[in-house]
Amino acid sequence: MPEEQLVKVNIDGIPVEVAAGTTILNAARQIGGDIVPPAMCYYSKLSGSGGKCRTCLVKVSKGSEKDPRPMPKLVASCRTTVMDGMEVQNITSAEVIEARKGIVEMLLLNHPLDCPICDQAGECSLQDLGYEHGAAKTRYEFERRQFERIDIGDKIQLHMTRCILCYRCVFVADQITDHRIHGILNRGDHSEISTYIHQAVDNDFSGNVIDVCPVGALTDKTFRFKNRVWFTKPVEAHRDCDKCCGKVTLWYKGEDVLRVTGRKDVYGEVEEFICNTCRFDQKKTVDWIIEGPRKVANTSVISSNHYDSLKPLPVIKKNLALQEANKEQLERYTRL
Ligand code: SF4
Ligand code: FES
């Protein structure tokens, strides 16, 4: 087998060697941590995804060893491949941070701030971005796009008002299900996700559109308004399934399984897609072989009260008030 060609790239001052043809975003993911650009439309398991939302913009301050000129504009890191000797700036560039603020403002032009009643709250990429980069006030004065909620399948509801047109659900339908009946209709600010015929989405893997949606536009009707995700406990489980891998996360409240999802990685992407039978029809503990609690990053709101072990941030060591607050958290955890 021919040896894989590696190229050297430097992202925010951190060097990494990756296979030729890797995108800047995936090179950054190989380093991990804060320097990884956010991605609202790219999804590593869906080919052709990315290039729509611009949240992953970075600055290429050196093009390559052969041609060190910087790229004239910020580039979408999910669509730009690395070159040998390339130097990239993400969080070390004020220009990138400023541009990202603008992108978040644009994404929020038509996105309602209904997080208090949205099922996606607590695991919404746009909510996280809003906290990190959002402005306290909007400058937008015009009427926002509003849509009626529709059922695009018997267990999937589409709330188009929240959609950011990332196309992920369309790629899922195209690549994971046997036939696609929904897509994006019209162009520009008239674009909308639609099926034309309500309740039309009914194939075995259609539920995956819920998992890939980065916002609360596609929701699981069997879980809608049942609970806030941070009051539920994620548990890993599997079953023998003849349609999919059968590896899922069960979200418990007390003894009840409120919802079933695919297992998501640190970037919020499912590790493997699951079928609708596992997702919607197997909601009893006896249906599953329980593996144990799902590890949740302790920066996530879902982890509140579910810490594996308490790892105080360095700042806590110096701050008595934070130490006190942390003690309470620990006691609460032990009580659960
Ligand atoms: S419904 Fe969700 S997944 Fe589909 S395009 Fe809109 S935001 Fe993306
Ligand atoms: S993640 Fe790169 S453009 Fe959306």
Image (cartoon, rainbow, N blue to C red):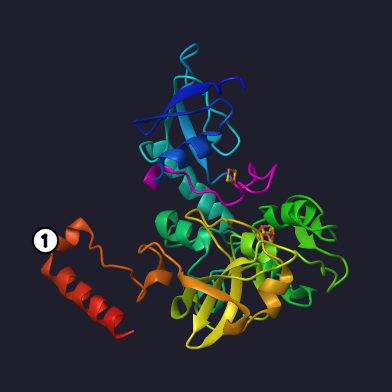
Q: Point out the stretch of residues depicted in magenta.
A: 33-53
Tell me: is circle 1 under 8 Å from ligand 2. no
Q: Which residue reaches farthest right?
A: 197
Q: Residue at x 36, y 62 (%)?
A: 299
| Rendered view: 66 above or below 135 | above
Q: Residue at x 40, y 65 (%)?
A: 300
Q: Which residue reaches farthest bottom?
A: 255
Residue 178, percent from left and from top? 84, 57
From the image, which quarter does the N terminus lie in?
A: top right
Q: Amino acid at mark 1?
A: Lys
Residue in front for this viewpoint, 131 or 275: 275
Q: Secondary structure at mark 1?
A: helix
Residue in front for this viewpoint, 73 or 278: 278
* Residue 4 in view of the camera: yes
Q: Residue at x 67, y 73 (%)?
A: 279
Q: Is residue 38 magenta?
A: yes
Q: Residue at x 84, y 73 (%)?
A: 198
**Does residue 17 appear to the left or right of 5 in the view shown?**
left
**Does residue 50 appear to the left or right of 228 in the view shown?**
right
Residue 278, percent from left and from top? 68, 72
From the image, which quarter does the C terminus lie in?
A: bottom left
- Tell me the crowding category of disc 1: few under 14, some 14 to 19, or many 20 or more residues within 10 angstroms, Cα based: few
Magenta region's main secondary structure?
loop
